[in-house]
Amino acid sequence: MSPYEWRAPRTRGVLWRRAVTTSREARILPDGCTDLIWSSRTGLMVAGPDTTAGLSDLTAGDLVIGLRFPPGTGPAVFGLPAGELTDQRVPLDVLWPAATVREIADGMAAGGGGDLLDRLAEARLRAAGGPDPRAQVITRSLAAGATVTATAAEVGLTERALHRTSRDLYGYGPKTLARILRLRRALALLRAGAPKATAAADAGYADQPHLSREVRALAGVPLGQLELA
């Protein structure tokens, strides 16, 4: 977790904050998550789960605060399957009543910060009966390198049913989710100082070139050009 991120106490997601000092494009890597984001410039929006890296325009002077939900939790917060938000950025008032969104926006502008987003999301989760309990099992299994077949058996689903469930919870099927989670493991190892070959092997890649191909496919740039900070 970066210095700009901290654990959300209520939803167990990740709260993050960026005070933009220089206008630039930021590369956002896929992570299997959905974010609720407030920007002092553009207001409230939902960032759906990405299949590949996206570029976000950051404007100097902007303050951006977000809450990244654990994989599979977003659907319970926003009230629709994650597949309907895949690779999309949607204004929050498209999903929730405009009056509710205005109230939240006013609270954020008044300094409500990440705690306001976390409290709001907790209330939504409670009303929905909590996140689908299968999400935690599926995420843990695939993140540990288990096959789709083994993961389906652990959850008690057929592989076809797991594919449907995964699309609803994460926005894409279990094979894509497994690729994304494996890349996140490798990048975490690289950030911790592991050599590329070691990170590739420990994350479950056949070799370093395999990792390099996946970085290019999912992040859109060669491994040597990827910012790891």
Image: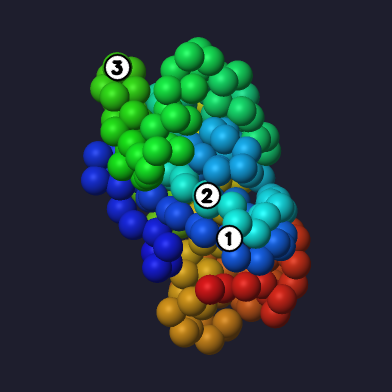
Instruction: Give the side of residue 49 with respect to residue 103, left or right.
Output: right
Question: What whole-number distance in Å separates the C-alpha atoms at marks 1 and 3?
Answer: 35 Å
Q: Is residue 111 above or below residue 86?
A: below
Judged from the image, the secondary structure of the residue bearing numbered disc 3 is helix
Which residue is at 70% across, 79% downward? 224
Q: Are marks 2 and 1 in contact (CB under 8 Å)?
A: yes
Q: Amino acid at mark 1?
A: Val
Question: What whole-number distance in Å separates the C-alpha atoms at marks 2 and 1?
Answer: 8 Å
Give the image location of residue 6, x and y in percent. Answer: 34, 57
Task: Identify the mark nearer the N-term, 2 or 3.
Answer: 2
Q: Amino acid at mark 2?
A: Val
Where residue 20 is drawn, which disc sits there?
Answer: 1
Where residue 64 is drawn, which disc sits there?
Answer: 2
Judged from the image, the secondary structure of the residue bearing numbered disc 1 is loop
Instruction: Give the side of residue 135 with respect to residue 184, left or right.
Output: left
Q: Toward the viewer: 81 or 61?
A: 61
